[in-house]
Amino acid sequence: MSLTNLEDVVTAATTVTDSAVLANALRNFLKRDVAEHLLASSLPDDVDPLAILNPTTNTLGYLYVLTARLEQPGAAIQLAPQIYAFCEGCSSTPLAYVSERVNTFVNRLMRQPNLPELLEALAKFVQRYPHKRDVFTMVHMVFLHACVVTRQYQVALPVLSVPMGSIDKTIYPINYLDNLLYHYFGAFVYIALKRWPQAEEFLEMVVAAPIASSIPSAIQMEAMKKLALVQLIRHGTLKSLPRYVPQMFTKSIKQSPYGQLAKAYPAGNLIQIAEKEAKVFTQDFNFGLLREVLDHAPRWKLRTLTKTYLTLSMSEIGKEIGMEDGKVLRALVEDMIRVGEITAILENDTLTFIDEKPDFRPEDVEKALAEAQRQCERLALLDQQIGRSKEFLQKALKERDSGGGGAWAGHGGMDEELLWAEDLQGEGYV
């Protein structure tokens, strides 16, 4: 099939039922120098092709025309209704044949001045694009990047709530860096929303990703710094990393200002360390996260008292944790009781600690068991996929024979060119 003008494109998009044939014809049409200009133009009598095409039944034609119109920055302001119509109504099956055009579409959206207003549409597109919601694509990473740079963190949550359980590089090409950045940007979202357990999980996924050489990527090193701070917030100390994570990460942190801070936490000279190393934390875009660590220090001091005392007066607690303001101290204690950080009763000016007793409801147990079963099924499927991967098996055998230790990533060098000058942190984390 040969397409020569916009009329041919619209006719093919509305009549050809074989998505593979139509995708190939559109791909060949795009090789022409004037293709983008033709796709962005109007039909005879100034008829808008997007008014004829349906985003659900004519997904490919709609995508190619819409993407061409987005080539110019600012075009999305007038095209917002069409963008929403496409993102909410497109069909995933034909899109599987044109991943390169999809990538162009989302990258052009990223350059639009009204990107914040388009994120809801892009979120819906990310969830409709792959043939299964848990299939990871490059679009997932670009979407999270958009949420971070626009500071629209809540919009990312529906996408992040679906664990990425599989990949299909034959349909949705991705690389090693896409995976790192997806979890890195996801961690930014969770940090900005102060969802520390999820932030820790995503940062650990970045750090634990196999490295392509003996030197970890810049992204992994940055993630390790943030992981150290998040662990101090969540656990009051640095946690041991999984055994398969290279020891260089732990060593690099211990020998850095982050290690000094962790060693002194929560009762040491934290303010002095923060002031002395302020330049380092600021250059790493971690000064706001450092403030959260310092703000959580009194909470961890108070939690350590539960291991020693049964009853304390508020004045005694104030002396122990270094908090003189009685109103602030009372608000802190009441909040810690409310959120479950300590189990205690506050009566007048006396705090009585209570031994924690697990409280498991039958429905909670059933929910946990069901989730465990789902995860086992997902792991079994992933194990089968890995077992069928020729690339993985060949690399594993090579590593075994050479005595190498987990340097496989299937990718090399791209992240070395990444610049980290741009501030991608959330509100209050710069």
Image (cartoon, rainbow, N blue to C red):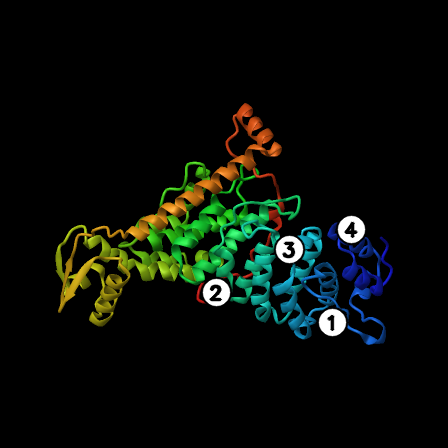
Q: CA distance from mark 2 to mark 1?
A: 32 Å
Q: CA distance from mark 2 to mark 3?
A: 25 Å
Mark 1 or mark 3: name the one nearer the start of the chain. 1
The residue that mark 1 highlights is 51
In depth, the one of 88 and 318 nearer the eye is 88
Mark 4 or mark 2: name the one nearer the start of the chain. 4
User: Residue at image x 70%, y 61%?
Assistant: 57
The residue that mark 4 highlights is 21
The residue that mark 2 highlights is 154
The residue that mark 3 highlights is 92
Q: Amino acid at mark 1?
A: Ala
Q: CA distance from mark 4 to mark 2?
A: 39 Å
How packed mark 1 is, by other alpha carbons closer than 10 Å (few <14, some 14-19, many 20 or more), is few
Q: Amino acid at mark 3?
A: Ser
Secondary structure state at the residue bearing disc 2: helix
Q: Amino acid at mark 4?
A: Val
Secondary structure state at the residue bearing disc 1: helix
Q: Position of residue 185 (x, y in %)?
A: 52, 56
